[in-house]
Amino acid sequence: MVKIDILIAEGKVSKISELELPRYVNFFENSHKENLEHSKAVMAAFPRWSIISGYYAMHDMTKLLLAKNFLLKIEMEVHVTTIKVLPELIKNAEMPRLIKIRLLLVSKND
């Protein structure tokens, strides 16, 4: 398992500055919703695109969680790096609670 410090040293992950945080969070708050809506809209006619859009909604929501709760930004090899970061954060005792809160917020807005 890769340590987050190593990913930061490799330039694949960085800490988000307080100045950048609002813009970054705003982008992913909107992006994951748009991808989820697209996924629902094309489900019957284009199921493959529905899956792709659903994946991007999940991926963007994960990056939103990383930014809001850990001030982490995925910089390089974004899909693989995001997958590498998650197991490290799941060790964090707060993570199950944060995921549950996030899922409740998303379902409330649907």
Image: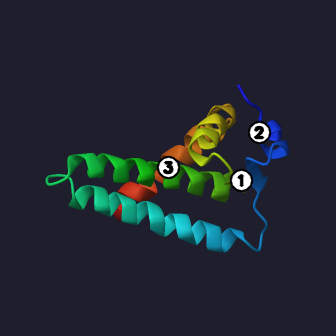
- What colouring does the structure picture have? rainbow
Callout 1 touching callout 2 (CB < 8 Å): yes
What is the quadrant of residue 105 in the picture?
bottom left
Q: Is residue 72 left or right of residue 42?
A: right
| Residue at the extreme front of the image, as rendered | 77
Q: Is residue 65 above or below residue 80?
A: below
Callout 2 touching callout 3 (CB < 8 Å): no
Residue at numbered disc 1: 72
What is the quadrant of residue 40 in the picture?
bottom left
* Mark 1 surroundings within 10 Å by alpha-carbon count, few (fewer than 14), some (14 through 19), many (20 or more): many
From mark 2 to mark 3, how far is it between C-alphas?
18 Å
Disc 2, SS? helix
Asked whether 46 or 99 is in front, the reply is 46
Q: Which residue type does callout 2 highlight?
A: Ile
Residue drawn 30% across and 62% down?
38
Earlier in the chain: of badge 2 and badge 3, it is 2
Q: Which residue type does callout 1 highlight?
A: Leu
Earlier in the chain: of badge 1 and badge 2, it is 2
From mark 1 to mark 2, how far is it between C-alphas?
10 Å
Image coordinates for residue 55, horizontal then vertical, percent: 40, 47
Q: Is residue 48 left or right of residue 24?
A: left
Residue 4's tag is: 2
From mark 3 to mark 1, how far is it between C-alphas?
14 Å
Earlier in the chain: of badge 3 and badge 1, it is 3
Quadrant where the image shows the N terminus: top right
Residue drawn 73% across and 30% down?
2
Q: Is residue 81 above or below residue 25?
A: above
Residue drawn 36% across and 55% down?
107
Disc 3, SS? helix
Residue 59's tag is: 3
